[in-house]
């Protein structure tokens, strides 16, 4: 049997790659304009990095990780997210000492063993940013503005920003007690997972997708009642700065995000035309994570955006790569050397050259040139070689002219 891609993984084929590159170029360019530098970390890490940061009771760590024991006995995991690896790298290389405001972005593949469906794969891609060193609301807003800017540039419509603050330590502790007190009488109505979460991480129950649990939660106490004065004024600043940048948002008290490490601002961009898997980007502030992973206390904020989902909602521009291309028709073994040299020279001058290497007939090469959509063909046969001249054929108009070989590059460069 022929081998196939593993369930939940996909090849990105030549006809799709243009859209991926378009998306990646926008990310590089806009992240650059905001003064962020790219960071690339390995695709596998110590398992402990994820169980400690993302949290043992999350879906990611409890059932979605691809983990194995290395021959040397270490426990390794294909990265299911990139915040923890970036934080690990930040600590390991003392990046905070090099730059008190360290602004990083990444693009890369991630691995989660989930049930594959539209917008949900086992190998998928994210781009994201992480900023270390500022606890202030303007940093949250810059990060949100960056994401918003990228979506706007990509022409993604019907996307909205949901915003919440889950407060800092004191707030979380008070809210946790309030939530447990509220949910305990409903315990028997909750799913098994939520019953477990009631003990381990009750905030995550707010994340539920089960309809009758959503109903119960409607009347749950609001996190805003537990904000400290500092939490409140931080969040008010985030909102007023966003308004000042004309970035619309909706407040969503139940937006707590799945991972353990968030503090204060949390946000999500959702797209209306994606159906069930509607979150394209999630992020927020995580002021305690660097310290939790062994670094010096450092405030931080960031987001991660799912590239497959963005591509699903991206209006694609026509595939025009803007390149002028030439088809170099070469006829017979005697002209091979000259043809390769000519192609080389044209390519060094920035011209895209297709050249036959299947030793096909004139007719077959012309047909191929048309299929590729090239507008001009250069024809080199033995006769042309002898005279140091080539035929240049305009494939649209059908006209043909003969020019000297040494004039060829000049002819096409103008
Ligand atoms: P969801 O609620 O859809 O499971 P999540 O909260 O698990 O999302 P994050 O861990 O915050 O997602 O990752 C950020 C983004 O990465 C998501 O908003 C989504 O666009 C994308 N993403 C997450 N998991 C997958 C997946 N299995 N396949 C494709 N994209 C994904
Ligand atoms: Mg998920």
Image (spheres, grey):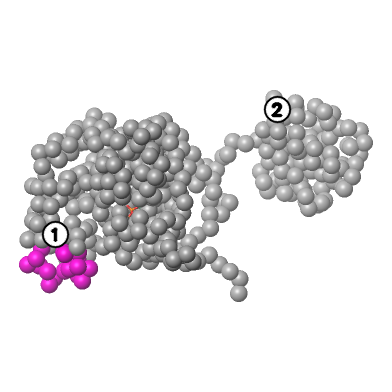
Residue designated by label 1:
217
Most distant residue in the front direction: 72
Residue at x 45%, y 56% (from the top left corner): 44
**Snapshot quadrant of residue 195:** bottom left
Ligand 1 is within 8 Å of the C-beta of the residue at disc 1: no
**Snapshot quadrant of residue 397:** top right
Main structural element of the magenta stretch: helix, strand or loop?
helix
The first of marks 2 and 1 along the sequence is 1
Region in magenta = 183-199
Whether the magenta-drawn stretch holds residue 210 is answered as no
**Snapshot quadrant of residue 194:** bottom left
Q: Quadrant of the C terminus?
A: top right
Q: Is residue 228 left or right of residue 148?
A: left
Pick the front one: 68 or 207? 68
Residue designated by label 2:
413
Pick the front one: 253 or 362? 253
């Amino acid at each position: 049997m022929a081998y196939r891609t593993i369930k939940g993984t996909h090849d990105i084929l030549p006809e799709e790659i243009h859209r991926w590159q378009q998306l990646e170029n926008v990310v590089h360019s806009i992240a650059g304009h905001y003064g962020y530098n790219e960071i690339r970390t390995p695709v596998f890490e110590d398992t402990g990095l994820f169980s400690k940061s993302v949290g043992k009771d999350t879906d990611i760590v409890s059932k979605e990780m691809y983990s194995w024991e290395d021959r040397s006995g270490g426990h390794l995991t294909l990265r299911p997210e990139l915040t923890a690896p970036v934080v690990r790298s930040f600590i390991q290389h003392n990046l905070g000492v090099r730059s008190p405001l360290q602004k990083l972005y990444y693009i890369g593949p991630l691995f989660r063993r989930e049930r594959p469906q539209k917008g949900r794969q086992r190998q998928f891609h994210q781009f994201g940013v992480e900023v270390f060193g500022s606890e202030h609301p303007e940093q949250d807003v810059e990060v949100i503005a960056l994401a918003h800017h990228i979506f706007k540039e990509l022409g993604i419509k019907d996307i909205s920003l949901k915003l919440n603050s889950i407060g800092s330590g004191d707030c979380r502790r008070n809210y946790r007690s309030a939530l447990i007190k509220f949910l305990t009488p409903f315990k028997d109505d909750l799913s098994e997972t939520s019953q477990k979460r009631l003990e381990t991480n009750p905030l995550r129950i707010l994340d539920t997708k089960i309809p009758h649990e959503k109903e119960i939660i409607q009347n749950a106490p609001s996190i805003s009642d537990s904000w400290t004065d500092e939490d409140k004024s931080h969040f008010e600043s985030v909102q007023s700065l966003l308004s000042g940048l004309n970035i619309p948002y909706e407040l969503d008290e139940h937006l707590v995000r799945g991972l353990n490490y968030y503090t204060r601002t949390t946000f999500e961009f959702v797209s209306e035309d994606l159906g069930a898997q509607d979150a394209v980007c999630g992020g927020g502030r995580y002021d305690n994570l660097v310290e939790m992973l062994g670094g010096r206390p450092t405030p931080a904020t960031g987001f991660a955006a799912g590239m497959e989902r963005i591509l699903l909602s991206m209006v694609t521009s026509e595939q025009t790569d803007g390149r002028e291309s030439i088809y170099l028709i070469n006829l017979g073994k005697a002209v091979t050397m000259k043809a390769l040299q000519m192609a080389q020279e044209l390519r060094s001058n920035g011209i895209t050259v297709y050249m036959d290497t299947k030793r096909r007939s004139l007719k077959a090469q012309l047909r191929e040139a048309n299929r590729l959509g090239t507008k001009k063909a250069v024809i080199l046969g033995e006769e042309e070689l002898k005279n140091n001249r080539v035929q240049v054929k305009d494939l649209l108009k059908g006209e043909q002219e003969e020019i000297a070989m040494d004039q060829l590059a000049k002819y096409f460069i103008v």
